[in-house]
């Protein structure tokens, strides 16, 4: 038997997996708000820190019609001195 693939959790506050976000996008979510409404990702008590991952993920899909192998975080707007 092969090893079971772990599901990557994108939104830790609401325990939303990468697979759930991919499914929402395949089912027609075309904006971040669509993803937030469909999955509850990005609307947790942390204030939506996972949005920096979901945005580029969605943009990549909309441009390429496929999902990136690795999710990259959009760090524009973050103050490198503060780390947030």
Image: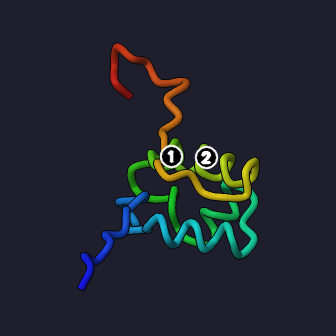
The disc at residue 53 is: 1
| Pointer 1 local density, CA inside 10 Å: few below 14, some 14–19, many at least 20 | some
Q: In the image, 24: left or right of 77?
A: right
Quadrant for the N terminus in the image = bottom left
Image mark for residue 55: 2
Q: For residue 65, which quarter of the picture?
A: bottom right
Residue 57: x, y in percent?
A: 59, 50
When asked about the image quadrant of residue 15, the answer is bottom left
Looking at the picture, does residue 38 appear above or below residue 66? below
Where the C terminus falls, by quadrant?
top left
Q: Position of residue 18 (x, y in %)?
A: 47, 64
Residue 73 in percent (x, y) is at 48, 39
Q: Nearer the viewer, residue 57 or 43?
A: 57
Q: Is residue 26 above or below residue 76?
A: below
Picture layout, residue 39 above or below residue 55: below
In the picture, measured across the screen, residue 74 lies left or right of residue 17, that is right
Residue positioned 68% across, 47% down in the render: 59
């Amino acid at each position: 038997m092969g090893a079971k693939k772990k599901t990557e959790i994108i939104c830790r506050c609401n325990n939303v997996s990468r697979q759930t976000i991919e499914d929402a996008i395949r089912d027609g979510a075309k904006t971040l708000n669509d993803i937030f409404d469909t999955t509850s990702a990005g609307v947790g008590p942390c204030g939506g820190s996972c949005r920096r991952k979901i945005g580029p993920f969605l943009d990549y899909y909309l441009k390429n019609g496929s999902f990136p192998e690795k999710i990259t975080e959009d760090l524009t707007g973050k103050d490198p001195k503060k780390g947030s």
